[in-house]
Amino acid sequence: MRLVPALSVTVLAIVVVVLVALTVRSPSVPTYPPTPAAPRDAGATLVGPVLYTVDASAPDAWRAFSFQLGSVVGDVPGDLEFRRYSIVAGPGAGVRDLGETPFDDVRMVPNDGYVFNEGRGEPRNAAIAAWYRYGFFTHVLTPKPHVWAVRTAGARYAKLQIVGYYCPGPQPGCLTFRYVYQGDGSTRVDAPPRRVSWLSTRSR
């Protein structure tokens, strides 16, 4: 009769040990070093896909990113702003969640339905606030396989997909995303197929 309680205690102890081990185990996550700031006006061209990492690790500072300049910016408004795991739209910009879809399959983005930020002191953008899944045992943030569209304050469009959140170390706060930006004001965000001329094929 005494074996049953003893067995229960043993099983419980094993479960606790396993849970603790899962919690303290160092998770294996992809890491990305921050991309150096190098603003360059894209003009009316189609840019991308580009992989970019914003160092948003400071808990008390927002980092602004401009698609037109292809860089983190300091003195001009950005299209997106990052702080740790928080992502919001820049002034006059909006975000729309296109759902779980392959990045390359998004060739056009909508021209309406974009969500603006809520609140001022602690802004939140409902379209992109839940961009991650949280691991209860690992405490790791994993990006959802969604694609988001951004409409800038200047009525330009971009698509983006978040691919990582960790700096080398790994340390949290390096938000990494790939994007395509359309600078001509249209909603087309895929590169046109390359034309191969008869002359170029004969010269090979």
Image (cartoon, helix red, strand yellow):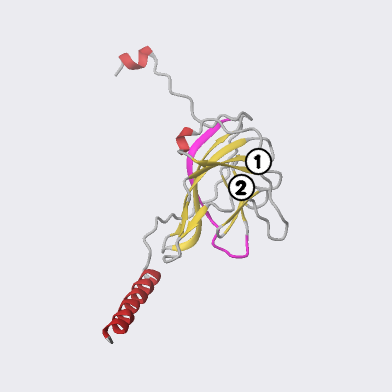
Quarter of the picture holding the N terminus? bottom left
Q: Position of residue 136 (x, y in %)?
A: 45, 65
Q: Which residue is mark 1?
A: 114
* Residues rendered magenta in the picture: 45-61
**Classed neighbour count for the residue bearing mark 1: other residues with Cα under 10 Å, few (<14), some (14–19), many (≥20):** some
Residue name at image x 64 percent, y 53 percent: 74
Please tell me whether residue 49 is drawn above or below residue 176 in the rendered image.
above
Residue name at image x 46 percent, y 46 percent: 145
Q: Label 2 vs label 1: CA separation?
A: 8 Å
Toward the front, the furthest residue is: 1
- The answer to whether residue 135 is seen in the rendering is yes
Q: Which residue is mark 2?
A: 127
Quarter of the picture holding the C terminus? top left
Q: Secondary structure at mark 2?
A: loop
Instruction: State if disc 1 and disc 2 touch (CB < 8 Å).
Output: yes
Occupied quadrant, residue 10: bottom left
Please tell me whether residue 45 is drawn above or below residue 139 in the rendered image.
above
Amino acid type, residue under disc 1 in the picture: Tyr
Please tell me whether residue 134 is drawn above or below residue 66 in the rendered image.
below
Q: Secondary structure at mark 1?
A: loop
Q: Is residue 127 left or right of residue 137?
A: right
Q: Position of residue 119 (x, y in %)?
A: 72, 56
Frontmost residue, 110 versus 192: 110
> Could you say which disc has been placed on residue 150 in the image?
none
